[in-house]
Amino acid sequence: MSNISQSDSTITAYYDLKTAPITFDFCQFIVSAAAYTVAKGQKYFDLVVLADGFRNVTVREKQYTLSERRWRVWNLILEIAKVVPSIRNVSISVTAPAVIAANSYPKGYHPTYNPQIPYDIPLVRKAHDAGIDVRLFAPSDYAMTAASRLTADSSGKFVTITLRKADYEAIRDSRVEEWYEFSLLVRERGYEPIIIPDQDDALGSESINKFDWRVLNVAAMSVDLRLALYNQAAMNYVTNGGAIGLFIYSKAPFMWYSVMVEGSAVASPEFYRKQGVEVGGKFPWLGENQEMVWEPDTLENLKKSLSKIQ
């Protein structure tokens, strides 16, 4: 059994990729770890990402190459960690740790004897019910400055549209043509629509560039910059995809369309009930300007939200 260090009272959160996914589900884990830190009366915690092996359970995971897995560690997991202000130190370990921190999260974590990593929404709900603010994701000061420079020509009057076009479960992809028509209506109201593409699309076919609208590929590559734009926008629109995690754990305004998608197990009524949300409801920690829209992202449904832009 590994030794346990007693030298530092700081909580260390372990995200073990042998039992946890390299997806936006990391958002639930890191928010839970931050909430655990608050509950223990501490201000900061450390994060250790264990990459000495990778989970290979889902169909999606079995399609990943080793290089893609490593890419996602650096360009997704660590990118999300950037917007958690209470993280003190971050490290990646490609070997099993010889020493486990005395104050670990998950409590009692051990890479061999207790390697399971929690990353479910009910954990976040539990923290919220205990009075802990779980909308903790915040962009850096530099990202806010960079976002302001990028949108200077819009005089601060802009709306973001985050589109999904992924290599996995295309049934949840955004209705791009209808979003384009909606963007014209947004422009008529005096706001610039800024499109933030799916990273898969930005690094692949760049299919959304065929429309006459402003696409910020750079925001698809930086969670910090993306979140800064979300915080400065008059409104943010998004459909059902991984980026939802950035919205629901931040204070940025948003309209989340296609919450429920027929044929998708992770967007079904049963899935949401397991997360503690009934059809038509929303997570209890969300603010007044943060809406879960259960209708599909058709143009007619999108038009109903124009009054939300302010």
Image (tube, rainbow, N blue to C red):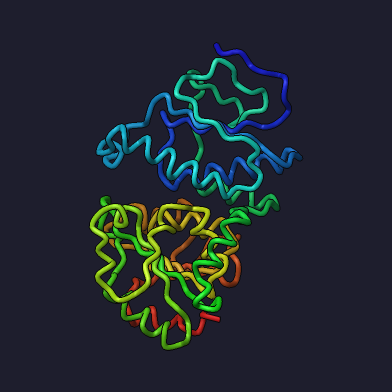
Q: Residue at x 37, y 30 (%)?
A: 54
The correct choice, above or below, for 251 with respect to 55 in the image is below
Q: Residue at x 54, y 61 (%)?
A: 146
Q: Is residue 42 left or right of residue 115?
A: right
The percent coordinates of residue 285 (x first, y second) are 60, 60
Q: Is residue 162 left or right of residue 262?
A: right
Q: Is residue 284 visible?
A: no
The correct choice, above or below, for 23 with respect to 234 in the image is above
The percent coordinates of residue 186 (x first, y second) are 42, 82
Q: Is residue 194 visible?
A: yes
Q: Residue furthest bottom?
A: 188
Q: Indicate the quadrant containing the C terminus: top left, top right, bottom left or bottom right.
A: bottom right
Residue 253, by quadrant, is bottom right
Q: Residue furthest right?
A: 41
The correct choice, above or below, for 285 with respect to 97 in the image is below
Q: Indicate the quadrant containing the N terminus: top left, top right, bottom left or bottom right.
A: top right
The percent coordinates of residue 192 (x first, y second) are 45, 78
